[in-house]
């Protein structure tokens, strides 16, 4: 094991070996956060060097035309780069672990869809996905790619720059929103909203139960790329701890639960998760 992990320093190598020992022979549930996607070019909110952002709340979006206009302009400007992001080695390693029957699935706090594109089949998207938009009035669902074409048809003046300072959820801070036509539902004319959980919204109860079930049917929990500031992650960790399951945390920098982990690995997920895929033996 130590030989395979030569890309790590001694401390990280020891932690990876300890984690593999704790996880070997177990079916593993995985919880991922924004740190899993940073190597795909999508920044996170809280990691080292992350841009200072003030995320829009659900109340702001639902109650203010100007807030919605600001959201849709910024989201459209960032959509091309966000949608072009490709799965990285960490995403692919988790898909490989699921393919081999070692990982039971992925619960993710991310809205980028990269786990699905990497080949993971059981993915619980706790905070929704940017791939879809829905009408808050009639419930009609739209593909985001189709909506992007509508936005450009309604706003022919808008120009999407080639290189943009992408935000954590794929948005860009626009220079102006003047004259922007906000997209509405083509079925009933109602308000459109991305199929994501905004700040100030609760995760749908059915979605969280699905995440709990994945942890409940597993023998260990790996938390990758999350600082665990969002309470849903802590709740899933506590579900695992109550059952005395091994908990391995992989994250650059401290998390809220380092002291509660069986093993904490302070390193990048794009490096550590492929090491897990290489080192974890097949289940008997």
Image (spheres, rainbow, N blue to C red):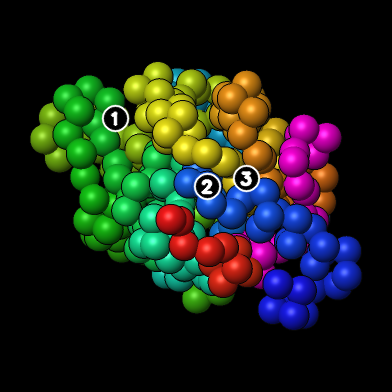
Q: Nearer the viewer, residue 104 or 171?
A: 104
**Name of the residue lying farthest toward the front:** 284
Say left or right for 17 vs 207.
right
| On screen, residue 171 above or below 228 | below
The magenta stretch spans residue 48: no
Q: Is residue 217 visible?
A: yes
Image coordinates of residue 23 in percent, x first then y, are 61, 50
Q: Label for residue 191?
A: 1
Mark 1, residues whose alpha carbon is within 10 Å: few (<14), some, or many (≥20)? Answer: some
The magenta stretch spans residue 261: yes
How many angstroms separate mark 1 from mark 2 (CA)? Answer: 46 Å
Q: Label for residue 150?
A: none
Q: Secondary structure at mark 2?
A: loop
Image coordinates of residue 143 in percent, x first then y, are 23, 50
Instruction: Name the residue rendered at 88%, 64% in the picture.
Output: 11
Q: Which residue is tagged 2?
A: 26
First along the sequence among labels 2 and 3: 2
| On screen, residue 271 above or below 144 | below
Quarter of the image for the N terminus: give it. Answer: bottom right
Mark 3, residues whose alpha carbon is within 10 Å: few (<14), some, or many (≥20)? Answer: many
First along the sequence among labels 1 and 3: 1
1 vs 2, front mark: 2
Say left or right for 162 vs 244.
left
How many angstroms separate mark 2 from mark 3 (CA)? Answer: 15 Å
Image coordinates of residue 184 in percent, x first then y, are 25, 37
First along the sequence among labels 1 and 2: 2
Q: What residue range appears in magenta?
A: 256-273
Q: Quadrant of residue 19?
A: bottom right
Instruction: Name the residue rendered at 53%, 64% in the picture.
Output: 281
Q: Label for residue 223?
A: 3
Q: Nearer the viewer, residue 165 or 67?
A: 165
**Name of the residue lying farthest toward the left:** 187
């Amino acid at each position: 094991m130590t030989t395979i992990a030569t890309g790590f320093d001694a401390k990280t190598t020891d932690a990876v070996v300890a984690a593999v020992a704790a996880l070997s022979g177990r079916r593993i549930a995985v919880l991922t956060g924004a740190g899993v996607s940073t190597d795909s070019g999508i920044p996170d909110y809280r990691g080292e060097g992350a841009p200072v952002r003030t995320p829009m709340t659900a109340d702001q979006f639902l109650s203010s035309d100007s807030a919605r206009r600001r959201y849709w302009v910024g989201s459209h400007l960032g959509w091309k780069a966000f949608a072009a992001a490709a799965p990285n080695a960490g995403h692919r390693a988790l898909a490989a672990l699921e393919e081999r029957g070692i990982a039971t699935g992925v619960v993710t706090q991310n809205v980028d869809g990269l786990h699905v594109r990497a080949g993971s089949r059981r993915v619980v998207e706790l905070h929704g996905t940017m791939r879809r938009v829905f009408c808050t009035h009639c419930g009609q669902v739209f593909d985001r790619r189709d909506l992007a074409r509508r936005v450009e048809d309604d706003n022919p003046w808008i120009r999407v720059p080639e290189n943009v300072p992408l935000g954590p959820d794929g948005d860009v801070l626009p220079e102006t929103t003047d004259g922007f036509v906000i997209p509405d539902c083509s079925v009933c004319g109602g308000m459109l909203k991305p199929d994501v959980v905004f700040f100030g919204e609760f995760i749908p109860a059915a979605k969280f139960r699905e995440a709990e079930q994945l942890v409940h049917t597993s023998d260990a929990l790996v938390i990758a790329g999350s600082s665990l500031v969002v309470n849903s992650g802590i709740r899933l960790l506590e579900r695992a701890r109550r059952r005395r399951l091994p908990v391995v945390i992989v994250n650059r920098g401290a998390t809220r639960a380092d002291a509660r982990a069986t093993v904490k690995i302070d390193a990048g997920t794009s490096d550590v998760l492929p090491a897990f895929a290489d080192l974890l033996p097949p289940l008997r």
